Structure formats: C-alpha cells, structure tokens
Amino acid sequence: MSRSAAVKQIISPDEKESICREMLEALKDGSMLPGELDKKSVEEEYAVNCRMLPVWASYDDEEGRLQGFLALRETSPYAAEIYIMGVKKEYQRHKAGKALFTAMLNYARRQGYEYLQVKTVKQGVSEAMDAANVFYQGLGFRELEVLPLWGDSDPCQIYIRNVNF
C-alpha cells in the first residue's frame, strides 16, 4: 500500500533538532551512520547542527506521523550537500525520500546552487547502505570519488549532481 507524503520545511531550531533526534533513534540499526564512527558524538553533532540548517520533514498524510527528514548544508556559494537524510523503515519505498529530495531540490534551485553532493558508504561495502546508493543514483547523482573519511571499513563515496539536471 502506497502512503502519500506531506513535506514541509521546518523553521523552528528546536523542532529541527527534535526531528533529527527522533530519526536517529528510529534508525539505530546503523543504516544512517558508518560503522567506525563514535555514533554517540556523531548523533549529537548532527542534532545540534541541524538547528541552523534548512530542514524538511515528511509526514504521513493519513496519520500525520513523521516519515523522514533531510537537512541541507551549504558547502560554497555554488554547492550544497545533503548533510543528513533518513526515512523510517516502514515508509521506505513509499516516495517519502523522493518527496523530501524534490522539496530540497526546489529550494536549492531558488538559492542559486549549481551542484549538490551527498556522502554515503561505498556501494558493496554495507548492505544497509547499498539501498541508499541506489536511491541517490536514481535521483541523478553520479560518483565523484571515494575517500577514507570514515575509516578503512567504511570508505566514503561522494556523489554529485547538477541542480538543473
């Protein structure tokens, strides 16, 4: 059964942090954070940083429950990155992620960004992250490079996408 998503941009810093914390808790199985990182300190950093970033949240139209979220971070006047994104398991493959991305992409275009990037674990290394790789590729992201940012066991794949693609 497909569930429709209502996406809204979140303005309140407290609400942004709360949404980030709820999503990180909901996805504790490690599907959002690479293995060798100190997850507790990384989660805290994400939650605090989301307070100051543009954040979108997706809600179930029928029940009003939080489905997922996305935070965007400017990396230069010409580019931004998906800082963190997550969709609860029960809403994956129900277009919540696509709806979040579309809302963010429209914002990125209005801001005049030319490029978007996203970092994930290299395909084939983590079964949990392979679905994210396929998702980003399906949105038009292309491989740029792989860096050892997260340790040897979780090589960081950087994807890029032209905003006007």
Image: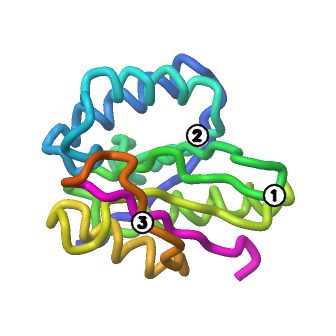
Crowd rating for badge 1 (residues with CA inside 10 Å; few <14, some 14–19, many 20+): some
The answer to whether residue 149 is left or right of residue 90 is right
Q: Is residue 58 above or below residue 133?
A: above
Amino acid type, residue under disc 3 in the picture: Val
Task: Report how far apart the C-alphas of labels 3 and 1 lie in the structure.
Answer: 21 Å
Out of 95 and 78, give the one closest to the viewer: 78
Q: Nearer the viewer, mark 2 or mark 3?
A: 3
Which label belongs to residue 55?
2
Q: Position of residue 114 (x, y in %)?
A: 79, 67
Which residue appears at 48% of the width and 64% of the height? 158
Q: Which numbered disc, 2 or 1, marks the residue that appears first in the sequence? A: 2
Q: Quadrant of residue 101?
A: bottom right
Task: Report how far apart the C-alphas of labels 2 and 3 lie in the structure.
Answer: 26 Å
Q: Secondary structure at mark 1?
A: loop
Which residue appears at 62% of the width and 22% of the height? 12
Which residue appears at 20% of the width and 74% of the height? 124
Q: Which numbered disc, 2 or 3, marks the residue that appears first in the sequence? A: 2
Which quadrant, please, contains the C terminus? bottom right
Crowd rating for badge 2 (residues with CA inside 10 Å; few <14, some 14–19, many 20+): many
Out of 67 and 16, give the one closest to the viewer: 16
Q: Position of residue 41 (x, y in %)?
A: 32, 21
Crowd rating for badge 3 (residues with CA inside 10 Å; few <14, some 14–19, many 20+): some
Extreme residue toward the top, this view: 14
Q: Which residues are magenta?
A: 154-165
Does the stretch in magenta take in 158?
Answer: yes
Which label belongs to residue 78?
1
Residue named by callout 3: 146
Q: Which numbered disc, 3 or 1, marks the residue that appears first in the sequence? A: 1
Does the stretch in magenta take in 113?
Answer: no
